[in-house]
Amino acid sequence: MGNLLIIFKRELLSYFATPLAYIFIVIFLVVNGFLTFDFGGFYARGQADLSPFFAFHPFLYLFMVPAIAMTMWADERKTGTIELLLTLPINLRDAILGKYLAAWALIGIALSLTFPIWLTANYLGDPDNGVIFAAYVGSWFMAGAYLAIGACLSACTKNPVIAFILTVTICVIFVLLGYPFLLGMLIGWVPQIIIDAISSMGFLTHFDSISKGVFDIRDFLFFGVFIAAWLFASAVVIELKKAS
Amino acid sequence: MIEINNLTKNFDQFTAIDDLTFTVKEGEVLGFLGPNGAGKSTTMKLITGFLSASHGSISIDGFEISKNPIEAKSLMGYLPEGAPSYGDMTTLEFLNFVAQIRGYTGEEITRRVQRVLDEVELNSVSQQTIETLSKGFKRRVGLAQAIMHDPKVLILDEPTDGLDPNQKHHVRELIKNLARDKIVIISTHILEEVTAVCSRAIIIAQGRIVADGTPAELEARSKYHQAVSVRLSEKYDLAADLTGLAEVGDVEMDSEDNMVFRILASGGNSIFSQVSEIAQAKHWPIIEFHASRGQLEDVFRTVTQQTQGAQ
């Protein structure tokens, strides 16, 4: 068994060894249900799709994902286990990916447990399941982007609360970058190319098109590259901050 | 064999390790001594590849830690300071995890884990989560993971810190048993431990080696080496009877008991028989009379304070 897989397994099991995973999943499902059916007007819209469900995800992840990410490296540093882990014969890459993928898998599990909403839509009408599937994957990728930011900032500090606050802040910025309101303020005095560049860095820009059923591989590629970049940054931060 | 050449580690402006060079051979148990902040833990973190050196090289059996980290790390078992482990896992889960990372599969995992559980006597707590264990047990869990793969090089940062005297004894026995064909480096500030388990001691202060030798050699550098200690029943001027003897140096009164005196040997040779002849001839009022060994503690203080004074 590869070291990546061993670390992945250990991390994932450790989420379930404490109440953390269960609390995360339950709250994720409850809040999702509340937002979808109440705020989103799932029934009132009279349309068989999951738009109201996915529309809230960028904001839901804003608080849920940093909560998962905040301990990822901060705890390792605080308890000194990072010294144990990184003196075992493993690559830093395996450690970073193993830990990251375990947290991402936990989010994936929580997300897939929202399937009753999908069943409801299918019971009530005839939604485009291809679009829904793409939106699920897109949502999971977007969560992965939040998580990658969180992983990197968790490596910056021994204090998980600081990691949480920093992660939420940075994530807010990336959500707002794609917001039409913010972009509207720039039009007229900032060159269009810069507005486009800023807009293309925003999570909403990419997630909106995915969740509306516009399947463009570039949107997935954006999240993939974004995740890879932040994980690479984590590696740099871990190397730099090991001594302190 | 561990070869360390010109090892230097700087943190910003501060030099934690300053041009350290030494080698350790198979079968040696090296005690790494030094005051707090001398660079003991930093040196161990460099050897195990957790930190990377600013200058110099470390090679473990020919594998340089900066160039072949995986190979070098495979040869080493390491107990970091404070014996960190994943608190939410049970002892058994944690040791299984380490066995898997060390590359064992199937039956071999069970066999290896059972062996270390027996060796450090952890069977009674194998199903308990590590965070619920006492300090002594946690330390033993740390030791168990370090010896899992029967490593050629064992690096233990304060292995007996926080253990009770029985546990200390047990850990020292364990280290002695392990040491036969291995390299063991332990850091400690308990000096009796060095005499008890180490075949060699290096004292470092402010990142530099200030003494290197067998515990006996280091003891011989003490001013109390070969000294004769006497306890008197009444006041008596010992120094007056000893003047003129070439090998005999000063007579010191004990700082805590004014009836106990130490007669120092100035040349490093035994003065025991000489002094005992005089004591008999002059009828010293003696209740106790024995040769004292050199005190490692005394040497430790002298060499580490010299460096501090020099700066």
Image: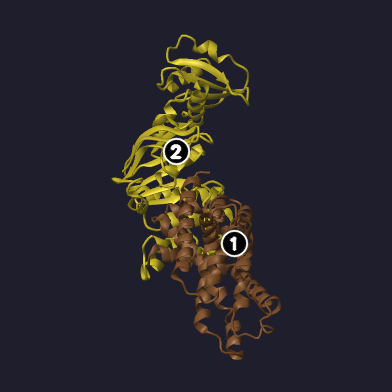
Q: Amino acid at mark 2?
A: Phe
Asked if residue B182 can be seen in this view, the reply is yes
At a point 39% along the width and 56% down the height, the residue shown is: A91
Q: Chain of mark 1?
A: A
In this view, B205 is above or below B121: above
How far across and down, in percent of the image, does residue B38 sit? 50, 34
> In terms of image quadrants, where is residue B257?
top right
At a point 46% along the width and 32% down the height, the residue shown is: B207
Q: CA distance from mark 1 to mark 2?
A: 53 Å
Report the residue marked by disc 2. B32
Name, please, the residue furthest toward the front.
A188
Side of B152 relative to B195 (left or right): left
Q: Quadrant of the N terminus of chain B?
A: top left
Q: Secondary structure at mark 1?
A: helix
Name, please, the residue furthest toward the left.
B62
Note the chain letter of the yellow one: B
Contact check, label 1 and label 2, Cβ < 8 Å: no
Q: In the drawing, what numbered circle is on residue A175?
A: 1
Name, please, the residue furthest toward the right.
A38
For the residues beneath circles 1 and 2, the answer to whether they share a chain is no
Q: Colour of chain A?
A: brown
In this view, B107 is above or below B34: below
The one nearer the camera, A114 or B239, is: A114
